[in-house]
Amino acid sequence: MLGIDRRSIQNFDWTLLGLITILTVFGLVNLSSATSTPDGLSDEMRRQLFSLGLGMTVAMVCAAVDYRHFERLALPAFCIAIGLLALTLVLAPVTRGSQSWLFGGRVQPSELAKVALVLGLARYFQRYPPGQTTRLRELVWPGAIIAVPVALIVAQGDMGVALLTLLVGSTYFALVRIPFRAWLAIAAVGVAALAALWTFGLADYQKERILVVVDPGRDPLASGYQATQSRIAIGSGGVLGSGYGEGTQTQLRFLPTQHTDFAFSVLAEEWGFVGTCVTLTLYVTLLIWGLVVARNSKDDFGALLAVGVVGCLFWPAVLNIAMVIGLAPVIGVPLPLFSYGGSALVVTFALLGLLMNVSMRRYVF
């Protein structure tokens, strides 16, 4: 199973490793400030460091095993992920309106489902290349691969992760060549689905979060409180920021869930416009580098795997940043490598390990 040889080591992607390392260090510094305590390391920081160690181990395994073996594992991995999502509906307790965690809140199956979804779609489109998909009915099977985990996550009540999973899966649809009228049909179905979701699927508090985006002053002390405090934190950062550990919104705990959903707000308050620009530039560089890895891959499965990893990094970053600046409802989407969360961090490193895997073997066969 291991596919490490001299050529793989020679082609190790130091640029990718450097980008990951810098962003990870930035994320840890940001989390340290967001969770600072007079007694030293916070419990959240200790757990994040443990998850980082576990994630690095998983990444090394994912990079060491020749990625062509993952094509054979795609179907079993997808079935296991679906089974865990279904098991969550039976065993997981309801926490803040959703059933998302197993094993005492340590494992979030919906995060694992993203990896399985990328593997499943890469395997499907490797057999039926998206560039040769020209008819709408040819999207039925990949649509089903996406719809099953999304439906189970919706049933859990976690609409933010459901939307994220849908967007990650839809990344591949940008590569298909179906006619424009077919896209119009998809859009019509999507609008109908959104209308049905609004009418029958969303709780009142979830509808309020969406309405607050349109009217920020609608409920400033309840559903609009998080977004309002986030914008205050971002605005107070100015050009250079207030400095590490000096953000008033952060340190006085006015900013809610600042170590998870609003980690970017902490970054903006303490490091300002310059710090956020540097961080976003690193993110964009990482995403572009992932596309370069996809382009240089020697086979379709590797290229599709790299595209899926880019989608798994791009969509949560876009949704999280839009959320904290008030352009999207607060839906609980973490910022990769910055937000606190064990399952999310381990899965992110697993995906980055797969991307390194594809890059290392671009000249091997």
Image (spheres, rainbow, N blue to C red):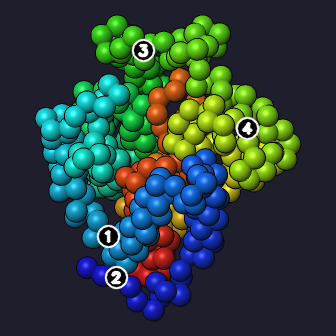
Residue 213 in view, yes or no: yes
- Mark 2 → mark 1, Cα distance in angstroms: 9 Å
Check disc 2 and report the residue beneath it: 3
Query: In whole angstroms, how far apart are the C-alphas of marks 3 and 1?
Result: 45 Å
Residue type pointed to by label 2: Gly
| Residue in the image at 29% along x and 45% along y | 105
Q: Which residue corresponds to mark 4?
A: 248
Judge whether 52 appears above or below 276 on screen: below
Q: Residues within 10 Å of mark 4 (few under 14, many from 20)?
A: some
Task: Specify the farthest residue to the bottom.
Answer: 6
Q: Residue at x 46, y 55 (%)?
A: 43
- Residue 185 percent location from the top left of the image: 40, 19
In front: 111, or 226? 226
- Mark seen at residue 68: 1
The mark closer to the camera, 2 or 1, is 2
- Horizontal relation, residue 338 to residue 7: left or right: right
Which residue is found at the position 35% from the left and 14% from the top?
Answer: 203
Name the disc covering residue 205, or none: 3
Q: Amino acid at mark 3?
A: Tyr
Lower position in the chain sequence, tag 3 or tag 2: 2
